[in-house]
Amino acid sequence: MTLKQTLSQAGEILAASNIEGPLLESELLLRHALKIDRIQLYLALAQELTPDQHEDFWRLVQRRLNHEPSAYITGHREFYGLDFYVNSDVLIPRPESELLVEKTLELGRNEAMGTIAEIGTGSGAIAISLALNLSETKIYATDISAPALKVALFNCRKHGVENIHLLEGDMLDPLPEPVDLIVANLPYVRESELARVNTLDFEPSIALNGGSDGLEKIRKLGAGLSTKLCPGGSLLLEIGQGQSEAVTSLLSGLFPTAKTAVFPDLGGIDRVVSLTLS
Ligand code: GLN
């Protein structure tokens, strides 16, 4: 069977199992099995697969049919135009989190940003996207999970980033000094809604579970902010659908004179909350 026939057959099988974007998925898996890029794939569409290639590819399709995310199967996920290594020790970076990077860079362009901390960095995708655009800024990236920090370190090296200090520990605890800006995509899914995350069997639930109301981690971060954020400093938080009012009122309760703002993602869902201290 040719590559072209294989792609369309796998696409149909994935579609029949309700896998989203079945053709793109089958292309990603075939490229991964054959270790070729998109152009090489298109140039080879009329070629036959060898028996080994055939076996490797269909093994990957089987994993996808078991709902393992393709990012874990291939070890890659694109975020903010960059390629990151991912494995099941880290959350797969989501496109909507790019807004957190954009808003942070906007702030960084307007105000001198000497130090930034990303709390719960996971794969490091957010911290690294920032570091590549803010080469003068010292960036701390923390995570409670040592295996996640290994992935972040791998990605720092992959992207040749040297201005990130990776720190192991809970929330703000490992920060050695107050910073100008704190950015975080904390776990914010309500415990009772975790089952709705369709990658739950594969992604680390520690990166998703926000406790009974989804805001447990955000509350904990807020409580520690006063000693870890410099005067005039800012916080940028990713939030889940429907959480903007609860999060802004939580933060305004803690810092009554601070300014808060909410920014929607491309889907029109409130996705980022900012707080700027006076
Ligand atoms: N956006 C993720 C999801 O809904 C949740 C990420 C998080 O908890 N920070 O799958």
Image (cartoon, grey):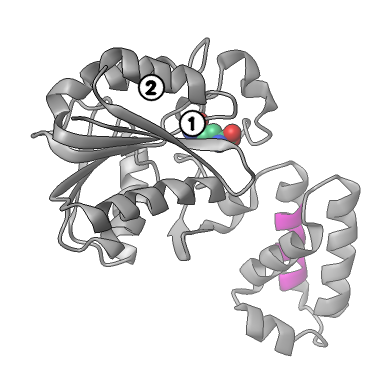
Residue 238 is drawn in which quadrant? top left
**Gap between marks 1 and 2, in whole Å?**
9 Å
Residue occupying the far left of the picture: 177
Work out whether residue 223 or residue 111 is closer to the camera in this orientation and state it.
111
SS at mark 2? helix
Which percent across, then down, holds residue 40? 65, 85
The crowd level at tag 2 (other Cα within 10 Å; few <14, some 14-19, many 20+) is many
Lateral position of residue 160 relative to residue 20, left or right = left
Q: Is residue 118 above or below residue 32?
A: above
Amino acid type assigned to the residue bearing label 2 in the image: Ile
Q: Which mark is residue 218?
A: 2
Magenta region, main secondary structure: helix
- What residue is drawn where x is 86% and y is 45%? 17
Amino acid type assigned to the residue bearing label 1 in the image: Ile
Q: Are marks 1 and 2 in contact (CB under 8 Å)?
A: yes
SS at mark 1? loop
Lateral position of residue 266 relative to residue 217, left or right = right
Q: Quadrant of ligand 1?
A: top right
Magenta stretch containing residue 173, yes or no? no
Image quadrant occupied by the N terminus:
bottom right
- What residue is drawn where x is 67% and y is 22%? 195
Q: Is residue 255 above or below residue 61?
A: above
Work out whether residue 104 or residue 54 is closer to the camera in this orientation and state it.
104
Asked if the residue at label 1 sits under 8 Å from ligand 1, the reply is no
User: What residue did someone put label 1 on?
Assistant: 239
Residue 122 is drawn in which quadrant? top left
Image quadrant occupied by the C terminus:
top left
Residue 204 visible to the viewer: no
Which span of residues is magenta-colored? 53-61
Which percent across, then down, holds residue 146? 30, 36
Residue 175 is drawn in which quadrant? top left
Work out whether residue 253 or residue 217 is closer to the camera in this orientation and state it.
253
